Image (tube, helix red, strand yellow):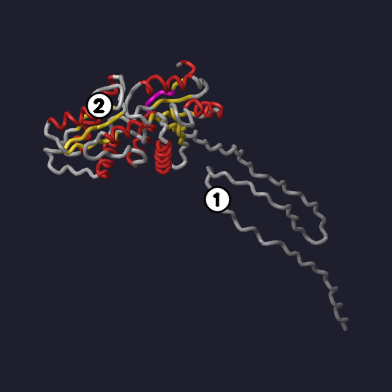
Amino acid sequence: MNAPAPAPAEESRTVLTTPPPAAPVPATSAQATPVPVASAPVAPTSAPGTSVSATPVPVVSAPVAPTSPAPTPSVPAPAPVLVAVGHGSRDPRARAALARLLDRVRELRPGLDVRLAHIELNAPLLDDVLAELAAAGGRDAVLVPLLLAPGHHVTHDLPAALAAAPALRARVADPLGAHPLLVEALADRLAEAGWTPGDPGAAGVVLASAGSRDPRSGAVTRRIAALLGERLGGVPVLPAYASAAAPTVPDAVRALTARGRHRVAVASCFTAPGLFATRAAADAPWIASDPLGAHPALARLVLHRYDRARTTLPVRELAAV
């Protein structure tokens, strides 16, 4: 009898597990440049009981683009100082009237440095204002004469004052002159005084101004008179002068009366009250307008002269004057 076969010995089995295969990476075009990505080292997998040295994966940093300093914003140069130059008067109303005029200029141009100066009789004097600006350094200036026409003050006094401040860069604007804004102010002041043309054949106007021996001054005044006559609808307007030129206001009144003009008004072509304006008003046979003073149109004209000078006239290097 055969003996039963022995049972087979128990087998020792070890089950090895392996990570699933990595998903395939899509192919990229040859032109694409991979961006290196920094990653932590990954320990390799191995069968149990197998010792494998971990190999660190090098960390690659992406290149950093160089940075350039931010541009410094440019700061615009300050606008030139507007120095409004009046003649000066012993009449205390004169300085106050010019101060009100410059307040209107500041309202029209907020932030603009506007200063008042006088050729004589009133403070601050032009020489003192220019010396103060020169001492401050680095500021340009535009001198705007508060005068109606060229004359000795414009052609001599202002350049002499500038020459006394050689460190200051400055321009000199034209006088107020024969401009529609000036004529607007003259017509409004006449209307305020009670001007009505009434019978056009009976009305006339005398344009009273300071006067000058400079022939250019007379030409400008005659042009202002012509423009005012047009503004008033063709009423004759004769220029007259308080000094240095003819005719006087009484002479011009008589000339208009001789032509049948019996309603004669005096238009005061002065920027501020003073001796000349007072005398001219006293010679009016009918009405006389007030000086131009702080009229809004005159404030606009001051800024017009300032802007024109700063944009069209060269800076005067006063050391060479």
Q: Name the residue that disc number 2 marks.
A: 248
Residue 310 in view? no
Instruction: Identify whether 223 is placed above or below 26.
Output: above
Residue at 84% x, 74% y is 8
Judge left or right: residue 169 versus residue 263.
right
Quick one: label 1, few (<14), some, or many (20+) residues within 10 Å?
few
Residue extent of the magenta highlight: 311-315
Residue 306 in sight from this viewpoint: yes
Name the amino acid, label 2. Thr
Amino acid type for the residue under numbered disc 1: Ala
- Where is residue 148, by image quadrant? top left
Which residue does the image show at 26% across and 38% down from the upper left?
Answer: 288
Disc 1: which residue: 27
Residue reaching furthest top? 320
Alpha carbons under labels 2 and 1: distance apart: 104 Å
The secondary structure type at the circle numbered 1 is loop
Give SS at disc 2.
loop
Q: Nearer the viewer, residue 184 or 125?
A: 125
Q: Is residue 70 left or right of residue 260?
A: right
Look at 35% across and 34% down and name the residue there. 271
Principal secondary structure, stretch drawn in magenta: loop
**Percent position (x, y) of residue 35?**
60, 46
